[in-house]
Amino acid sequence: MDFSLSKQHLLLKDLFSKFAENEVKPLAEELDEEE
């Protein structure tokens, strides 16, 4: 079985990874500090 990702899947994975790093992580850290 071939479980490798297509180029489109790799681009989406990279996009979501960058979004999570730049948008979600700072917000999560801010919420953690408030609690």
Image (cartoon, helix red, strand yellow):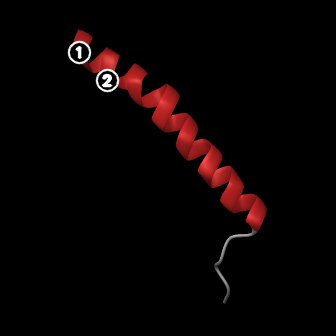
Q: CA distance from mark 2 to mark 1?
A: 6 Å
Q: Say the numbered circle drawn on residue 33.
A: 1
Q: Say the numbered circle drawn on residue 9.
A: none
Q: Quadrant of residue 28?
A: top left
In this picture, residue 18 sits left or right of residue 8: left
Farthest-out residue, bottom: 1
Residue 35 in view here: no
Quadrant housing the C terminus: top left
Going by the numbered disc 1, the residue's amino acid type is Glu
Counting other residues with Cα less than 10 Å from the Cα at mark 1, is it few (<14), some (14-19), or many (20 or more)? few
Q: Quadrant of residue 2?
A: bottom right
- Label 2 sits on residue: 29
Which residue is rendered at x = 33% and y = 16% of the image? 31
In this picture, residue 21 sits left or right of residue 3: left
Residue 6 in view here: yes
Q: Position of residue 14 (x, y in %)?
A: 61, 51
